[in-house]
Image (tube, rainbow, N blue to C red):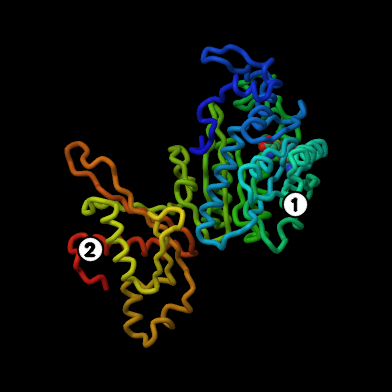
Amino acid sequence: MHSRNPYQTPPDFTRLADGFPDLKPFLKKTSSGVGIDFHDEAAQRCLTQALLFCDFGLSLILPPDRLCPPVPNRLNYILWIEDIQKACAKVRPIRSVIRGVDIGTGASAIYPLLGCRTNPTWKFWATEIDQKSAECALKNIQSNNLSDRIKIVQVAPDDKIFPTAIFENEQGIDFTMCNPPFYGSREEVLNSAEAKELGPSGACTGAETEMITTGGEVAFVKRMLEESLQLRDHCQWYTSMLGKMSSLTYIVQHLKFAKIENYAVTEFIQGKTRRWAVAWSYGDVHLPDSLARIPNRTLQNIMPPKNTLRQPYTQFQTSQDAEQRLLKVLMSIDGVSVTHEAEDRGNILVKAIGDTWSRAARRRKLKAVDSATDYGPGQVTLVSRVQCTQNTSATRGGSESRAVTIEFDWVQGRDRGLFESFVAHVSRKLGTLAMDPDVDMR
Ligand code: SAH
Protein backbone atom coordinates (compact mmCIF):
# COMPACT_ATOMS: atom_id res chain seq x y z
CA MET A 1 0.00 0.00 0.00
CA HIS A 2 1.16 3.57 -0.69
CA SER A 3 3.18 5.01 2.21
CA ARG A 4 0.77 7.97 2.57
CA ASN A 5 -2.33 5.74 2.51
CA PRO A 6 -3.96 6.06 5.95
CA TYR A 7 -5.54 2.58 5.62
CA GLN A 8 -2.33 0.63 6.14
CA THR A 9 -3.86 -0.41 9.44
CA PRO A 10 -7.54 -1.45 9.39
CA PRO A 11 -10.01 1.31 10.27
CA ASP A 12 -11.50 1.59 13.74
CA PHE A 13 -15.01 0.36 12.93
CA THR A 14 -16.52 1.55 16.21
CA ARG A 15 -15.25 5.11 15.58
CA LEU A 16 -16.57 4.94 12.02
CA ALA A 17 -20.02 3.83 13.15
CA ASP A 18 -20.12 6.67 15.70
CA GLY A 19 -19.44 9.14 12.88
CA PHE A 20 -21.70 7.34 10.38
CA PRO A 21 -24.50 5.58 12.34
CA ASP A 22 -25.87 3.72 9.24
CA LEU A 23 -22.85 1.43 9.65
CA LYS A 24 -23.90 0.27 13.15
CA PRO A 25 -26.27 -2.55 12.06
CA PHE A 26 -23.44 -4.08 9.97
CA LEU A 27 -20.89 -4.28 12.80
CA LYS A 28 -19.88 -7.79 13.86
CA LYS A 29 -17.56 -9.21 16.46
CA THR A 30 -14.54 -10.69 14.69
CA SER A 31 -11.43 -12.53 15.87
CA SER A 32 -9.52 -9.21 15.86
CA GLY A 33 -12.25 -7.06 17.46
CA VAL A 34 -15.08 -5.33 15.60
CA GLY A 35 -15.50 -5.49 11.81
CA ILE A 36 -18.01 -6.15 9.04
CA ASP A 37 -18.80 -9.16 6.83
CA PHE A 38 -16.83 -8.42 3.66
CA HIS A 39 -18.98 -10.95 1.74
CA ASP A 40 -22.05 -8.83 2.42
CA GLU A 41 -22.43 -6.29 -0.40
CA ALA A 42 -24.65 -3.94 1.61
CA ALA A 43 -22.10 -3.88 4.43
CA GLN A 44 -19.26 -3.11 1.96
CA ARG A 45 -21.27 -0.30 0.41
CA CYS A 46 -22.01 1.19 3.81
CA LEU A 47 -18.32 0.92 4.79
CA THR A 48 -17.27 2.82 1.66
CA GLN A 49 -19.84 5.53 2.44
CA ALA A 50 -18.68 5.71 6.08
CA LEU A 51 -14.96 6.03 5.16
CA LEU A 52 -15.66 8.70 2.55
CA PHE A 53 -17.87 10.61 4.95
CA CYS A 54 -15.69 10.40 8.07
CA ASP A 55 -12.25 10.69 6.45
CA PHE A 56 -12.93 12.90 3.41
CA GLY A 57 -16.17 14.76 4.18
CA LEU A 58 -17.84 13.21 1.11
CA SER A 59 -21.49 12.07 1.06
CA LEU A 60 -22.11 9.47 -1.64
CA ILE A 61 -25.03 7.63 -3.18
CA LEU A 62 -23.89 4.15 -4.23
CA PRO A 63 -26.67 2.37 -6.19
CA PRO A 64 -26.93 -1.35 -5.26
CA ASP A 65 -26.65 -2.44 -8.92
CA ARG A 66 -23.38 -0.61 -9.54
CA LEU A 67 -19.77 -1.21 -8.49
CA CYS A 68 -18.85 -0.40 -4.91
CA PRO A 69 -15.37 1.21 -4.90
CA PRO A 70 -13.08 0.14 -2.04
CA VAL A 71 -11.60 3.39 -0.72
CA PRO A 72 -8.04 2.21 0.18
CA ASN A 73 -7.45 0.87 -3.35
CA ARG A 74 -8.87 3.95 -5.08
CA LEU A 75 -6.76 6.16 -2.82
CA ASN A 76 -3.60 4.25 -3.79
CA TYR A 77 -4.10 5.24 -7.42
CA ILE A 78 -4.81 8.89 -6.51
CA LEU A 79 -1.63 9.00 -4.39
CA TRP A 80 0.48 7.63 -7.25
CA ILE A 81 -0.93 10.29 -9.61
CA GLU A 82 -0.20 12.87 -6.92
CA ASP A 83 3.44 11.67 -6.78
CA ILE A 84 3.71 11.91 -10.57
CA GLN A 85 2.37 15.48 -10.45
CA LYS A 86 4.86 16.41 -7.72
CA ALA A 87 7.74 14.96 -9.74
CA CYS A 88 6.68 17.00 -12.80
CA ALA A 89 6.22 20.16 -10.73
CA LYS A 90 10.01 20.24 -10.12
CA VAL A 91 10.68 21.30 -13.69
CA ARG A 92 7.63 23.20 -14.87
CA PRO A 93 6.29 26.63 -13.98
CA ILE A 94 3.90 26.65 -10.99
CA ARG A 95 0.34 25.95 -12.18
CA SER A 96 -2.75 27.21 -10.45
CA VAL A 97 -4.83 24.32 -11.89
CA ILE A 98 -3.97 20.67 -12.53
CA ARG A 99 -6.32 19.09 -15.07
CA GLY A 100 -7.18 15.39 -14.95
CA VAL A 101 -9.51 13.17 -16.98
CA ASP A 102 -11.14 10.10 -15.42
CA ILE A 103 -12.22 7.57 -18.06
CA GLY A 104 -15.29 5.58 -16.94
CA THR A 105 -15.96 7.40 -13.69
CA GLY A 106 -18.79 5.07 -12.64
CA ALA A 107 -21.85 5.93 -10.52
CA SER A 108 -19.64 6.97 -7.61
CA ALA A 109 -17.30 9.37 -9.49
CA ILE A 110 -14.85 8.15 -6.88
CA TYR A 111 -11.59 9.30 -8.48
CA PRO A 112 -12.62 12.90 -9.24
CA LEU A 113 -14.24 13.27 -5.81
CA LEU A 114 -11.27 11.87 -3.89
CA GLY A 115 -8.80 13.68 -6.14
CA CYS A 116 -10.48 17.07 -5.65
CA ARG A 117 -10.89 16.62 -1.90
CA THR A 118 -7.23 15.78 -1.40
CA ASN A 119 -5.78 18.20 -3.97
CA PRO A 120 -7.18 21.74 -3.95
CA THR A 121 -5.74 22.64 -7.39
CA TRP A 122 -7.13 19.63 -9.29
CA LYS A 123 -10.04 19.78 -11.73
CA PHE A 124 -11.53 16.85 -13.64
CA TRP A 125 -13.43 15.86 -16.71
CA ALA A 126 -15.07 12.50 -16.07
CA THR A 127 -16.37 10.34 -18.94
CA GLU A 128 -18.98 7.59 -18.74
CA ILE A 129 -20.94 5.48 -21.25
CA ASP A 130 -23.59 4.19 -18.88
CA GLN A 131 -26.46 6.67 -18.54
CA LYS A 132 -27.57 5.55 -15.11
CA SER A 133 -24.01 5.77 -13.75
CA ALA A 134 -23.45 9.17 -15.39
CA GLU A 135 -26.65 10.53 -13.77
CA CYS A 136 -25.71 9.19 -10.37
CA ALA A 137 -22.13 10.52 -10.71
CA LEU A 138 -23.58 13.97 -11.48
CA LYS A 139 -25.72 13.84 -8.31
CA ASN A 140 -22.69 12.85 -6.24
CA ILE A 141 -20.68 15.74 -7.65
CA GLN A 142 -23.50 18.23 -7.05
CA SER A 143 -24.27 17.08 -3.52
CA ASN A 144 -20.61 17.54 -2.59
CA ASN A 145 -20.51 21.05 -4.10
CA LEU A 146 -17.86 20.13 -6.66
CA SER A 147 -19.74 21.01 -9.87
CA ASP A 148 -17.34 23.86 -10.58
CA ARG A 149 -14.36 21.46 -10.53
CA ILE A 150 -15.73 18.21 -11.99
CA LYS A 151 -17.56 17.96 -15.33
CA ILE A 152 -19.29 14.77 -16.45
CA VAL A 153 -19.14 13.93 -20.16
CA GLN A 154 -21.44 11.17 -21.36
CA VAL A 155 -19.96 9.27 -24.32
CA ALA A 156 -21.08 6.46 -26.65
CA PRO A 157 -19.19 3.11 -26.79
CA ASP A 158 -17.95 3.82 -30.34
CA ASP A 159 -16.80 7.36 -29.58
CA LYS A 160 -13.15 8.05 -28.96
CA ILE A 161 -12.16 7.12 -25.41
CA PHE A 162 -10.38 10.48 -25.12
CA PRO A 163 -12.96 13.02 -26.38
CA THR A 164 -11.39 15.48 -28.82
CA ALA A 165 -13.17 18.45 -27.28
CA ILE A 166 -11.52 17.82 -23.92
CA PHE A 167 -8.02 17.05 -25.17
CA GLU A 168 -7.60 19.61 -27.86
CA ASN A 169 -8.17 22.57 -25.58
CA GLU A 170 -5.28 24.96 -25.37
CA GLN A 171 -4.47 24.48 -21.68
CA GLY A 172 -3.65 20.80 -22.06
CA ILE A 173 -4.35 17.89 -19.73
CA ASP A 174 -1.96 16.91 -16.94
CA PHE A 175 -3.07 13.31 -16.52
CA THR A 176 -5.66 10.74 -17.45
CA MET A 177 -6.71 7.89 -15.19
CA CYS A 178 -8.93 4.89 -15.74
CA ASN A 179 -10.19 1.80 -13.99
CA PRO A 180 -11.28 -0.03 -17.15
CA PRO A 181 -13.79 -2.87 -17.39
CA PHE A 182 -11.37 -5.74 -16.74
CA TYR A 183 -13.09 -8.61 -18.55
CA GLY A 184 -13.95 -9.58 -22.10
CA SER A 185 -16.98 -11.80 -21.34
CA ARG A 186 -19.30 -13.10 -18.60
CA GLU A 187 -17.40 -16.41 -18.54
CA GLU A 188 -14.19 -14.51 -17.84
CA VAL A 189 -15.86 -12.71 -14.91
CA LEU A 190 -17.07 -16.00 -13.43
CA ASN A 191 -13.66 -17.64 -13.88
CA SER A 192 -11.76 -14.71 -12.37
CA ALA A 193 -9.69 -15.17 -9.22
CA GLU A 194 -11.97 -12.78 -7.30
CA ALA A 195 -15.13 -14.67 -8.27
CA LYS A 196 -13.59 -17.90 -7.07
CA GLU A 197 -12.47 -16.34 -3.82
CA LEU A 198 -15.61 -14.38 -2.93
CA GLY A 199 -18.25 -16.75 -4.31
CA PRO A 200 -21.18 -15.66 -6.46
CA SER A 201 -22.41 -12.89 -4.14
CA GLY A 202 -19.04 -11.15 -3.78
CA ALA A 203 -18.25 -11.35 -7.49
CA CYS A 204 -21.32 -9.54 -8.80
CA THR A 205 -20.78 -6.12 -7.32
CA GLY A 206 -20.89 -4.46 -10.72
CA ALA A 207 -23.23 -4.15 -13.72
CA GLU A 208 -22.07 -5.80 -16.95
CA THR A 209 -21.02 -2.51 -18.56
CA GLU A 210 -18.74 -1.87 -15.61
CA MET A 211 -16.99 -5.21 -15.72
CA ILE A 212 -17.09 -6.24 -19.40
CA THR A 213 -15.80 -4.61 -22.58
CA THR A 214 -15.01 -6.19 -25.96
CA GLY A 215 -11.53 -7.66 -25.76
CA GLY A 216 -11.25 -6.94 -22.01
CA GLU A 217 -8.92 -4.43 -20.41
CA VAL A 218 -6.04 -5.09 -22.82
CA ALA A 219 -8.16 -3.99 -25.80
CA PHE A 220 -9.47 -0.99 -23.86
CA VAL A 221 -6.04 0.28 -22.78
CA LYS A 222 -4.65 -0.47 -26.24
CA ARG A 223 -7.34 1.82 -27.66
CA MET A 224 -6.20 4.51 -25.24
CA LEU A 225 -2.61 3.98 -26.31
CA GLU A 226 -3.53 4.26 -30.00
CA GLU A 227 -5.53 7.44 -29.40
CA SER A 228 -2.67 8.87 -27.34
CA LEU A 229 -0.34 8.37 -30.32
CA GLN A 230 -2.43 11.02 -32.08
CA LEU A 231 -2.94 13.31 -29.07
CA ARG A 232 0.64 13.01 -27.80
CA ASP A 233 1.59 16.12 -25.77
CA HIS A 234 -2.03 17.23 -25.34
CA CYS A 235 -1.76 15.21 -22.13
CA GLN A 236 1.39 14.91 -20.00
CA TRP A 237 0.75 11.48 -18.45
CA TYR A 238 -1.69 8.87 -19.73
CA THR A 239 -2.38 6.23 -17.08
CA SER A 240 -4.59 3.22 -16.48
CA MET A 241 -5.16 0.63 -13.82
CA LEU A 242 -5.08 -3.04 -14.84
CA GLY A 243 -6.75 -5.96 -13.07
CA LYS A 244 -4.52 -8.74 -14.39
CA MET A 245 -0.76 -9.06 -14.33
CA SER A 246 -0.78 -10.66 -17.80
CA SER A 247 -2.48 -7.51 -19.17
CA LEU A 248 0.39 -5.39 -17.89
CA THR A 249 2.85 -7.49 -19.90
CA TYR A 250 0.77 -7.02 -23.08
CA ILE A 251 0.40 -3.29 -22.58
CA VAL A 252 4.11 -2.77 -21.96
CA GLN A 253 4.83 -4.75 -25.14
CA HIS A 254 2.50 -2.43 -27.03
CA LEU A 255 4.24 0.61 -25.52
CA LYS A 256 7.56 -0.76 -26.72
CA PHE A 257 6.18 -1.46 -30.23
CA ALA A 258 5.07 2.17 -30.27
CA LYS A 259 8.63 3.19 -29.23
CA ILE A 260 7.39 4.81 -26.02
CA GLU A 261 10.29 4.51 -23.57
CA ASN A 262 9.05 7.04 -21.06
CA TYR A 263 6.66 4.85 -19.09
CA ALA A 264 6.09 3.74 -15.51
CA VAL A 265 4.66 0.67 -13.83
CA THR A 266 3.28 0.32 -10.32
CA GLU A 267 1.42 -2.19 -8.20
CA PHE A 268 -1.41 -1.56 -5.73
CA ILE A 269 -1.74 -4.16 -3.01
CA GLN A 270 -4.74 -4.22 -0.72
CA GLY A 271 -5.12 -7.34 1.38
CA LYS A 272 -5.23 -10.27 -1.04
CA THR A 273 -6.10 -8.09 -4.03
CA ARG A 274 -3.39 -6.92 -6.39
CA ARG A 275 -3.84 -4.38 -9.12
CA TRP A 276 -1.33 -2.78 -11.46
CA ALA A 277 -1.13 0.56 -13.17
CA VAL A 278 0.79 1.83 -16.13
CA ALA A 279 1.62 5.41 -17.12
CA TRP A 280 3.20 6.73 -20.32
CA SER A 281 4.25 10.12 -21.60
CA TYR A 282 5.41 11.79 -24.78
CA GLY A 283 6.99 14.58 -22.74
CA ASP A 284 10.60 14.94 -21.62
CA VAL A 285 9.94 14.72 -17.86
CA HIS A 286 11.02 11.43 -16.28
CA LEU A 287 9.92 9.79 -13.06
CA PRO A 288 12.29 8.46 -10.39
CA ASP A 289 12.52 4.67 -10.13
CA SER A 290 10.60 4.82 -6.84
CA LEU A 291 7.53 5.82 -8.92
CA ALA A 292 8.27 4.12 -12.24
CA ARG A 293 9.52 0.65 -11.27
CA ILE A 294 8.47 -2.03 -8.80
CA PRO A 295 10.59 -4.74 -7.21
CA ASN A 296 8.17 -7.58 -8.20
CA ARG A 297 10.60 -10.19 -9.54
CA THR A 298 8.28 -11.72 -12.11
CA LEU A 299 7.87 -8.34 -13.78
CA GLN A 300 11.51 -7.25 -14.06
CA ASN A 301 11.68 -7.85 -17.83
CA ILE A 302 8.91 -5.32 -18.47
CA MET A 303 10.19 -2.56 -16.19
CA PRO A 304 11.13 0.73 -17.86
CA PRO A 305 14.83 1.67 -18.11
CA LYS A 306 16.29 3.03 -14.84
CA ASN A 307 15.96 6.77 -14.27
CA THR A 308 17.70 6.62 -10.89
CA LEU A 309 21.41 5.82 -10.79
CA ARG A 310 23.18 5.23 -7.48
CA GLN A 311 26.87 5.47 -6.77
CA PRO A 312 28.31 4.30 -3.42
CA TYR A 313 31.39 6.03 -1.95
CA THR A 314 33.51 4.64 0.87
CA GLN A 315 35.79 7.66 0.73
CA PHE A 316 33.22 10.09 2.14
CA GLN A 317 32.25 9.72 5.80
CA THR A 318 29.30 12.12 5.94
CA SER A 319 26.72 13.33 3.45
CA GLN A 320 27.83 16.95 4.08
CA ASP A 321 31.38 15.99 3.14
CA ALA A 322 30.14 14.29 -0.05
CA GLU A 323 27.85 17.20 -0.90
CA GLN A 324 30.63 19.73 -0.56
CA ARG A 325 32.84 17.78 -2.97
CA LEU A 326 29.90 17.14 -5.29
CA LEU A 327 29.20 20.88 -5.51
CA LYS A 328 32.85 21.53 -6.29
CA VAL A 329 32.69 19.03 -9.16
CA LEU A 330 29.38 20.38 -10.50
CA MET A 331 30.55 24.01 -10.40
CA SER A 332 33.60 23.07 -12.43
CA ILE A 333 31.52 21.88 -15.41
CA ASP A 334 30.85 24.44 -18.14
CA GLY A 335 27.22 25.18 -18.96
CA VAL A 336 25.89 23.64 -15.74
CA SER A 337 23.79 25.49 -13.16
CA VAL A 338 23.14 24.22 -9.64
CA THR A 339 20.29 25.06 -7.24
CA HIS A 340 18.98 23.54 -4.02
CA GLU A 341 15.35 22.45 -4.15
CA ALA A 342 13.15 24.78 -2.13
CA GLU A 343 11.17 22.02 -0.38
CA ASP A 344 14.19 19.82 0.38
CA ARG A 345 17.51 21.63 0.74
CA GLY A 346 19.36 18.29 0.58
CA ASN A 347 18.31 17.84 -3.07
CA ILE A 348 20.44 19.53 -5.67
CA LEU A 349 18.88 20.32 -9.05
CA VAL A 350 21.43 20.38 -11.85
CA LYS A 351 20.63 21.91 -15.24
CA ALA A 352 22.93 21.45 -18.21
CA ILE A 353 22.85 23.03 -21.66
CA GLY A 354 24.38 19.92 -23.25
CA ASP A 355 27.47 17.77 -23.24
CA THR A 356 30.30 20.06 -22.21
CA TRP A 357 32.14 17.42 -20.21
CA SER A 358 33.12 14.59 -22.56
CA ARG A 359 36.59 14.54 -24.09
CA ALA A 360 35.13 15.25 -27.52
CA ALA A 361 33.22 18.26 -26.16
CA ARG A 362 36.33 19.68 -24.49
CA ARG A 363 38.32 19.22 -27.70
CA ARG A 364 35.58 21.07 -29.59
CA LYS A 365 35.75 23.87 -27.04
CA LEU A 366 39.49 24.26 -27.44
CA LYS A 367 39.03 24.72 -31.18
CA ALA A 368 36.06 27.09 -30.90
CA VAL A 369 36.54 30.81 -30.49
CA ASP A 370 33.28 31.30 -28.64
CA SER A 371 32.12 28.44 -26.44
CA ALA A 372 28.53 29.70 -26.50
CA THR A 373 28.23 29.06 -30.23
CA ASP A 374 29.88 25.71 -29.71
CA TYR A 375 27.30 24.52 -27.16
CA GLY A 376 24.21 25.90 -28.85
CA PRO A 377 21.91 28.74 -27.81
CA GLY A 378 22.02 27.79 -24.12
CA GLN A 379 18.69 26.10 -23.55
CA VAL A 380 18.63 23.36 -20.92
CA THR A 381 18.75 19.84 -22.38
CA LEU A 382 19.30 17.90 -19.16
CA VAL A 383 17.93 18.26 -15.63
CA SER A 384 19.09 15.88 -12.93
CA ARG A 385 18.31 15.77 -9.23
CA VAL A 386 21.24 14.73 -7.08
CA GLN A 387 21.08 13.67 -3.46
CA CYS A 388 23.74 12.47 -1.00
CA THR A 389 22.57 9.96 1.60
CA GLN A 390 24.58 8.76 4.54
CA ASN A 391 24.24 5.03 5.15
CA THR A 392 23.42 4.12 8.71
CA SER A 393 25.49 0.94 9.16
CA ALA A 394 29.23 1.61 8.98
CA THR A 395 30.33 -2.02 8.97
CA ARG A 396 28.67 -5.20 7.81
CA GLY A 397 30.07 -8.72 8.14
CA GLY A 398 33.31 -7.32 9.49
CA SER A 399 34.17 -5.46 6.28
CA GLU A 400 33.90 -1.73 5.71
CA SER A 401 30.56 -0.79 4.13
CA ARG A 402 29.94 2.15 1.78
CA ALA A 403 29.45 5.27 3.86
CA VAL A 404 27.67 7.62 1.45
CA THR A 405 25.46 6.97 -1.57
CA ILE A 406 24.99 9.62 -4.23
CA GLU A 407 21.75 9.24 -6.14
CA PHE A 408 21.11 10.83 -9.53
CA ASP A 409 17.57 11.08 -10.90
CA TRP A 410 16.96 11.84 -14.54
CA VAL A 411 14.30 14.53 -14.24
CA GLN A 412 14.12 16.04 -17.71
CA GLY A 413 15.66 15.63 -21.14
CA ARG A 414 15.29 13.70 -24.40
CA ASP A 415 18.69 12.03 -24.44
CA ARG A 416 19.24 9.17 -21.99
CA GLY A 417 22.85 8.85 -23.16
CA LEU A 418 23.50 12.46 -22.09
CA PHE A 419 22.18 11.72 -18.57
CA GLU A 420 24.28 8.56 -18.29
CA SER A 421 27.42 10.27 -19.54
CA PHE A 422 26.82 13.15 -17.06
CA VAL A 423 26.54 10.68 -14.15
CA ALA A 424 29.65 8.82 -15.30
CA HIS A 425 31.62 12.09 -15.58
CA VAL A 426 30.56 13.38 -12.14
CA SER A 427 31.26 9.99 -10.54
CA ARG A 428 34.72 9.84 -12.10
CA LYS A 429 35.56 13.37 -10.96
CA LEU A 430 34.26 12.65 -7.48
CA GLY A 431 36.49 9.59 -7.31
CA THR A 432 39.51 11.73 -8.23
CA LEU A 433 38.54 14.44 -5.76
CA ALA A 434 38.10 11.95 -2.96
CA MET A 435 41.69 10.78 -3.50
CA ASP A 436 43.12 14.31 -3.71
CA PRO A 437 40.88 17.13 -2.42
CA ASP A 438 43.11 19.86 -3.92
CA VAL A 439 43.10 18.48 -7.47
CA ASP A 440 42.23 20.99 -10.24
CA MET A 441 38.76 20.01 -11.45
CA ARG A 442 39.20 21.30 -14.98
N1 SAH B 1 -14.11 4.51 -11.97
C1 SAH B 1 -15.08 3.72 -11.26
C2 SAH B 1 -15.83 2.74 -12.18
C3 SAH B 1 -14.95 1.74 -12.88
S1 SAH B 1 -15.85 0.49 -13.78
C4 SAH B 1 -14.37 2.98 -10.14
O1 SAH B 1 -13.15 2.91 -10.15
O2 SAH B 1 -15.05 2.45 -9.25
C5 SAH B 1 -15.55 0.94 -15.45
C6 SAH B 1 -16.46 2.07 -15.92
O3 SAH B 1 -16.11 2.39 -17.26
C7 SAH B 1 -17.90 1.71 -15.94
O4 SAH B 1 -18.63 2.69 -15.25
C8 SAH B 1 -18.28 1.68 -17.42
O5 SAH B 1 -19.62 2.05 -17.65
C9 SAH B 1 -17.29 2.69 -17.97
N2 SAH B 1 -16.97 2.55 -19.40
C10 SAH B 1 -16.87 1.44 -20.16
N3 SAH B 1 -16.51 1.76 -21.43
C11 SAH B 1 -16.35 3.11 -21.46
C12 SAH B 1 -15.95 4.05 -22.45
N4 SAH B 1 -15.68 3.68 -23.71
N5 SAH B 1 -15.89 5.36 -22.11
C13 SAH B 1 -16.17 5.77 -20.88
N6 SAH B 1 -16.55 4.93 -19.88
C14 SAH B 1 -16.63 3.62 -20.17
Q: Residues within 10 Å of mark 1 (few under 14, many from 20)?
A: few
User: Residue at image x 50%, y 56%?
Assistant: 286
- Looking at the image, residue 172 sits to the left or right of residue 1; the answer is right
For the residues labelled 2 and 1, the Cα–Cα distance comes to 57 Å
In terms of image quarters, where does ligand 1 lie? Answer: top right
The C terminus lies in which quarter of the figure? bottom left
In which image quadrant can residue 56 be found? top right
In which image quadrant can residue 136 be found? top right
Residue 430 higher or lower than 359, as above or below? above
Q: Nearer the viewer, residue 181 or 337?
A: 337
Q: Nearer the viewer, residue 3 or 20?
A: 20
The answer to whether residue 385 is visible is: yes
Instruction: Identify the residue under disc 2.
Output: 433
Return the x and y of residue 226 as percentages of the image width and height: 66, 54
- Looking at the image, residue 269 sits to the left or right of residue 113; the answer is left
Instruction: Identify the residue under disc 1.
Output: 160
The single residue placed furthest to the bottom in the displayed view is 369
Q: Nearer the viewer, residue 186 or 421?
A: 421
What kind of element bears circle 2?
A: helix
What kind of element bears circle 1?
A: loop
- Which numbered disc, 2 or 1, marks the residue that appears first in the sequence? 1
Return the x and y of residue 18 as percentages of the image width and height: 64, 21
Q: Nearer the viewer, mark 2 or mark 1?
A: 2
User: Residue at image x 69%, y 21%?
Assistant: 21
